[in-house]
């Protein structure tokens, strides 16, 4: 038996390999179906003939009550996109299917404007009665990465495949330029035993993947150029990864001209073209003899809380000299890691292979993928060749009007609805009766205590409907739910002033007339009980003039509500710019002056400095951004939103934790290594400083790629010494040249790649105060143009004033930095060359 077992296994594997090789290699791209919609003639594209949908065919047919062909010959360089068919009513194509399997179904949409303005189309597409595109519109784009294609993998059985185009409403229409329907290679999509990554890094196996359609969301040629259908075995587009790579200096493009060693059971020419496996992004290693602690990271937009198939392509032509020891880590989000060992899979170099994972996306709408080295491996490198992301379509999505299931729903829907309505009414009656038994009647007024933010009446004995699931924090800050209802007029919609990661925010007025901001948690907003408790714990222990004070909280009846001092002027971002689709009430004349902006930055820096240094436990905010800096009626800035904060001991250099924060503001070192430090806040604050200067979003996908990231774009100008060319147009000619020079230096220091190279917040604060002095001092360019000069203005020299800290009890610290109510008076005592 000892000698027989290996031979038996080897024999079985050989049979399996031969079967797999024969089935994959015997596949050829079918000739059908390729449809040229709206064209009177056929067209040869990428060695495939797209036949006119006006011709009579026995294998497929067009059924349409009201459709027309349109043409615009001079608009597109691609002849396939010069014609289209418009559907004003529900219409369908039917295809004869002679073989069971997974089918590739592609729709081409190019929204040219003549004869219908196709970009106004609004419609659904159904496949065999199941919605695969819902509420769909096509928007034109002038970017090189724009692909007018929607692609699906559909499980189809022998019979007829019906594709329905259904206008969204009576005022809209549907259209298509071309349709492809053909059988995919055997075993192209696995149906079972796929590694499944669910929430918080939990893993398992996913089975039944082919029970639902798959919608291709991203297909990326990592490290390479755009690939068109002419150069792809399955007529696909692959786009470069430049727009998805988070930090370009962590990676370098690399390519391979040698022979690719396709292995039995591995990737085939149909999984990806050779050009995908011949290019990669490799770690950009500066010191080949030293350890590498960074990762290469990409981020992709995906649907929130949906299931996705992620296919990652690899081909190790990089570690040829020491290929047997090659291994590195793959990360999906921050919770899941997997070790890639190319030569445990295939013993030859340059052997293409891929890894499939099914994962559940989170609430961010972004999927992060990273590769990085293993610390115990001699080959301190990592690479990636390609990425494909496909959404698993929910089969319970709305069906079309022609679906039998929809007709059945119309019959039984009212019956089920009636039963549900009765149950809801009964539940409401029982809830009201139960509430009357335990809800106290509020007969006394609640008095605001301005300093501590607490209630003069104890609410700690109020019982919640969940039996105090939210443990009583015993902070003397509890406010009754009845008081909240009074303050917000029962959450009157017209009092809603914003919405964030925790929930909706309402303006309220307490019984004593004090104005407050009320944040009410809502399910599905990503932040919940941990963030609720953390914010209370943090804000109950600190007090500073540049931190938004917590007035109280409410945790009755499953409610999680936070009450703050109301900040009259809203967020800093409100006064800089508005995002697309947002209304903007502030006029141009109400924009902030440069002097005001500097003072706001100084105020915010003071608040952050206190968080970092003003307590026995340092506080890392972790979500510094312009919407978390609020302004009171006098434009004094205060830092807000501590739901993601971390409290740690002073002697800790970093905290290893999962990545949380806002895209565009994240510290790259924190994102790569998951090590959170005080310098992570410094980096985020540096991005805010750029927002203040340039008055534009930190990430703007509507701009050219080189301008999409504010930090990268602005630093390219700073390194050229031309930061003045990208300032807010309202500030042109209004910033002292020496002030701008110093300001640019501060930002550049804050945005250093590694935290050890960044200044502390107290240094940033000191330099910003120096900037304000430069702005308000009429000095010539020489000799003060450089911050490193030893020549100062002839002003009295004083030592820097120390901060004072006074502890109050055990739960609160009052920290007063020296106050600058009169900035000029205080700055008259500063030595100009005292900037850091």
Image: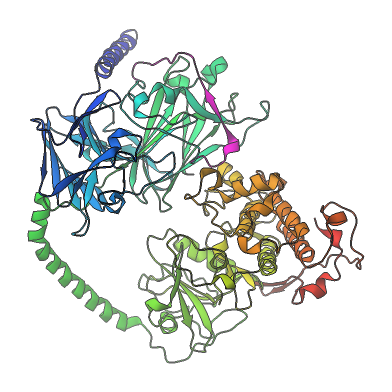
How far across and down, in percent of the image, does residue 334 sit?
49, 44
Please tell me which residue lies in front, 257 or 109.
109
Main SS category, magenta section: loop
Quadrant housing residue 181: top left
In the image, is residue 751 above or below residue 222? Answer: below
* Residue 477 visible in the shown view: yes
Residue furthest to the front in view is 74
Q: Is residue 835 magenta?
A: no
Q: Is residue 257 magenta?
A: yes
Residue 775, quarter of the rendered image: bottom right
Q: Position of residue 701 (x, y in %)?
A: 47, 49
Specify the quadrant that holds the C terminus: bottom right
Residue 712: percent from left, percent from top: 60, 46
Q: Does 495 sit above or below residue 753? A: below
Please provide the residue range marked out in magenta.
Answer: 244-265
Residue 382: percent from left, percent from top = 54, 29
Image quarter of the N terminus: top left
Q: Going by the picture, which residue comes out furthest to the top?
A: 3
């Amino acid at each position: 038996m000892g000698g027989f077992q290996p031979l038996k296994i080897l024999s079985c594997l050989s049979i399996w390999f031969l079967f797999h090789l024969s089935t994959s290699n015997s596949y050829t791209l079918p000739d059908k179906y390729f449809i040229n919609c709206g064209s009177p003639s056929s067209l040869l594209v990428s060695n495939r003939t797209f036949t006119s949908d006006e011709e009579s065919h026995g294998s497929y047919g067009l059924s349409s009550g009201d459709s027309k062909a349109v043409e615009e010959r001079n608009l597109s360089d691609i002849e396939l996109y010069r014609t289209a068919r418009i559907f004003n009513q529900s219409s369908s194509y039917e295809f004869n299917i002679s073989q069971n399997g997974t089918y590739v179904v592609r729709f081409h949409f190019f929204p040219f404007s003549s004869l219908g303005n196709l970009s106004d189309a609004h419609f659904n597409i159904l496949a065999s009665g199941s919605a695969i595109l819902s509420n769909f519109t096509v928007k034109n784009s002038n970017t090189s990465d724009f692909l007018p294609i929607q692609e699906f993998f559909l499980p189809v059985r022998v019979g007829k495949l019906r594709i329905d185009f259904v206008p969204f409403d009576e005022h809209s229409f549907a259209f298509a330029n071309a349709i492809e329907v053909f059988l995919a290679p055997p075993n192209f999509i696995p149906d079972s035993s796929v590694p499944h990554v669910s929430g918080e890094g939990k893993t398992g196996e996913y089975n039944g993947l082919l029970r639902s359609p798959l919608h291709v969301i991203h297909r990326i040629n990592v490290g390479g150029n755009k690939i068109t259908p002419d150069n792809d075995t399955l007529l696909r587009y692959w786009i470069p990864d430049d727009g998805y790579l988070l930090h370009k200096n962590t990676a370098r493009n690399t390519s391979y001209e040698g022979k690719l060693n396709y292995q039995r059971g591995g990737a085939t020419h149909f999984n990806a073209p050779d050009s995908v496996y011949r290019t990669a992004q490799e770690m950009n290693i500066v010191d080949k003899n030293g350890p590498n602690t960074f990762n290469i990271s990409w981020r992709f937009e995906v649907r929130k809380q949906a299931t996705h198939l992620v296919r990652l392509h690899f081909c190790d032509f990089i570690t040829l000299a020491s290929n047997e020891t090659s291994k590195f880590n793959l990360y999906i989000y921050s919770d899941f890691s997997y070790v890639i060992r190319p030569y445990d899979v295939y013993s030859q170099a340059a052997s293409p292979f891929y890894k499939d994972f099914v994962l559940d996306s989170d609430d961010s709408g972004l999927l992060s993928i990273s590769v990085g080295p293993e610390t115990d491996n001699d080959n301190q490198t990592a690479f990636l060749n390609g990425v494909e992301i496909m959404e698993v379509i929910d089969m319970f999505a709305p069906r079309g009007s022609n679906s039998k299931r929809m007709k059945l729903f119309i019959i039984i829907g009212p019956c089920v609805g009636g039963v549900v309505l009765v149950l809801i009414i009964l539940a409401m009656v029982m809830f009201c009766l139960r509430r009357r038994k335990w809800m106290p009647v509020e007969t006394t007024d609640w008095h605001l205590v301005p300093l501590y933010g607490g209630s003069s009446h104890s609410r700690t004995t109020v019982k919640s409907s969940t039996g105090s699931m939210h443990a009583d924090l015993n902070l003397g800050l509890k406010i009754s739910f009845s008081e909240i209802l009074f303050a917000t007029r029962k959450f009157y919609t017209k009092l809603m002033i914003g919405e964030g990661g925790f929930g909706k925010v309402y303006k309220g007025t307490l019984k004593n007339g004090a104005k407050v901001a009320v944040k009410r948690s809502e399910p599905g907003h990503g932040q919940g009980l941990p963030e609720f408790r953390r914010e209370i714990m943090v804000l109950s222990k600190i007090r500073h003039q540049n931190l938004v004070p917590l007035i109280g909280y409410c945790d009755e009846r499953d409610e999680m509500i936070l009450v703050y001092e109301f900040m009259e002027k809203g967020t800093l971002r409100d006064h800089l710019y508005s995002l697309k689709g947002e209304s903007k009430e502030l006029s141009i004349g109400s924009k902030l002056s440069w002097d005001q902006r500097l003072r706001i930055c100084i105020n915010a820096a003071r608040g952050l400095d206190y968080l970092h240094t003003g307590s026995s436990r340092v506080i890392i905010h972790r979500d510094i951004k312009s919407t978390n800096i609020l302004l009171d009626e006098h434009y004094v800035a205060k830092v807000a939103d501590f739901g993601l904060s971390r409290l740690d001991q002073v002697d800790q250099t970093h905290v290893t934790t999962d990545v949380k924060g806002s895209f565009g503001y994240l510290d790259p070192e924190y994102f790569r290594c998951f090590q959170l430090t005080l310098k992570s806040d410094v980096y985020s604050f540096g991005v805010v400083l750029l927002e203040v200067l340039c008055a534009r979003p930190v990430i703007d996908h509507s701009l050219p790629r080189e301008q999409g990231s504010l930090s990268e774009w602005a630093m390219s100008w700073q390194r050229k010494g031309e930061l003045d060319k990208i300032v807010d147009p309202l500030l042109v000619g209004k910033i002292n040249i020496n002030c701008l020079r110093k300001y640019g230096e501060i930002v550049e220091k804050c945005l250093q790649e590694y935290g050890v190279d960044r200044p502390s917040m107290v240094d940033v604060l000191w330099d910003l105060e120096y900037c304000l002095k430069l702005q308000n001092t009429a000095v010539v360019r020489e000799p003060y143009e450089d911050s490193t000069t030893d020549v100062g203005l002839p002003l009295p020299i004083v030592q820097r004033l120390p901060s004072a800290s006074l502890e109050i009890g055990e739960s609160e610290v009052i920290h007063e930095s020296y106050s600058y109510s009169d900035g000029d008076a205080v700055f008259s005592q500063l030595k100009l060359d005292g900037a850091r």
